[in-house]
Image (cartoon, grey):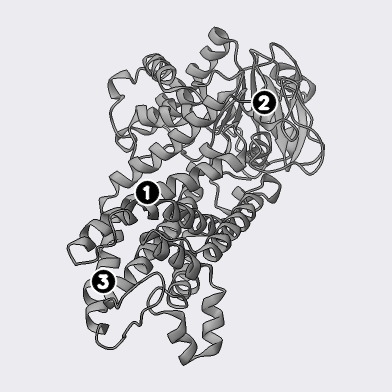
Amino acid sequence: MIDVSFAVAPASFTALLGLNGAGKSTLFALITRLFGTQAGRIGIFGHDISLAPGEALRLLGVVFQPRTLDLDLSVTQNLLYHAALHGIAKREARLRSDEVLTRIALADRAGSKVRDLSGGQMRRLEIARALLHRPRLLLLDEATVGLDVKARADILGHVRQLVIEQDIGVLWATHLFDEIVPGDDLVVLHQGRVLAHGPATNIIADAGARDINSAFMRLTGAAVDPGSPAP
Amino acid sequence: MSSVTVNRHQSGFSLAQYVTCLNGIVWREALRFVHQRERFVSALVRPLVWLFIFAAGFRQVLGISIIPPYETYILYEVYIAPGLMAMIQLFNGMQSSLSMVYDREMGNMRTLLVSPLPRWYLLFCKLVAGTAVSLLQVYAFLLIAWFWDIAPPPIGYLTVLPALVVSGLMLGALGMLISSGIKQLENFAGVMNFVIFPMFFASSALYPLWRVQEGSPLLYYVCLFNPFTHAVELIRFALYGQMNWISLAIVVCCTTAFMIGAIYAYDPSRGLVRRGPAGGEA
């Protein structure tokens, strides 16, 4: 990562747009302290991830690109395990678990093994899990990869609702242009550098483009088929 | 990522939160163990094969003189029982490290590592969970062995528990340290050849050290410096209500060293997760 600097406002939806290999997952690994930072500073609501990782991580909810659910455990057991990792007592964890499962319409699958869920249901469960400890900032790394069109729309819609209803800040990493709407805050990442940051409409206008596709191509010079989502 | 500071949460974690985390990790490990019944069976079959076949076959060949903690002549089966108990823990420690490599490859490890509790504590919890599972296996083995006339004094079943905990922690910490250095699941076969077998055979598990010394002084020293030897001796003495202080000291020191090594190896600045395929595009 080179000269990467941007902020995500509370209760906002920020899209992190970049092609495969742009550095999105590396950035997420740095924010979540899976990798250590060699230079620079990452702050989560004032807590430096290197100096106060516990304080920073308790404010973060994370959905990684690869599935991180335990397939052999049930839906509820996965949630309770996550709650325990955040020091949430079992009684409280059960209450929260029931609450989030109802919200994502998986209450009837609470006892099912995760491996019996569909891809979309697993993603919804991962998002629910990430919200269980009531974070202030939610990170989602390519959360819709591998899902069908309807499941993608459901997930994206659900996350946008969270921003509105629960005042959660969201950093949504994607390489799909159609997941970004003009009103979103947008960070364009390319080869480890931030090429543009600001409201998507401004970035489009500054690039002299007519939409996000063409603005992205002008900024990066990437060979992307303008008629479709990026590969 | 936000630079905005609002409503800071309470700092630090309470003791109850630490305990909750430990319970959660042990509970998950126990659930996985229950789900993998074949793992339990194979963990039992391995030492029982040694006991029922190997020991029976070598009973007449390998005579055992009276050595502490034994106060009389003993059957070979009785001699190797503590070694087989330690073997269960050795395999369990390596199995735990195998599951950590698997978790890392599958991405599950991230769930653990992004917990806000200190990483050293999370690794310690994993270690405790693995040790707890090994205790179940060892006591199941002791129960079956009792029907084979391996019957230490009743108090031994209690006094051996702390020894099993310490040796389980040491072997688990070793497995954890090894797991940090394994890049792919496929490489784990090497652990069998280069760690488990040499540790087991170059120890006092199958034959007393004085016999080894008679055969090869060099091998004797290898056995003497093998931490697994001291895990075996610690268990052997504890099973008869006695304490081998030297073995205890060595096992505790090795546990500490392996644990520190594992914590260092899992330090984020070393980019642990980068070693796996990670699934990301980075």
Image quadrant assignment for residue A48: top right
Closer to the camera in the image, B180 or A69: B180
Closer to the camera in the image, B193 or B217: B217
Question: How far apart are the two marked residues, 1 and 3, measured between alpha carbons?
Answer: 21 Å
Pinpoint the chain carrying mark 1. Answer: B
Residue drawn where x is 20% and y is 67% of the image: B149
Question: Where B94 falls versus A12 (above or below)?
Answer: below
Q: Is residue B107 visible?
A: no
**Labels 1 and 2 within one chain:** no
Question: Where B148 falls versus B168 (above or below)?
Answer: below
**Which numbered circle lies on residue B51?**
3
Pinpoint the chain carrying mark 3. Answer: B
Image quadrant assignment for residue B5: top right
**Which numbered circle lies on residue A55?**
2
Amino acid on which disc 2 is placed:
Glu
Q: Quadrant of the N terminus of chain A?
A: top right
Residue positioned most to the left: B147
Image quadrant assignment for residue B76: bottom left
Pinpoint the chain carrying mark 2. Answer: A
Residue positioned most to the top: A165
**Which numbered circle lies on residue B133?**
1
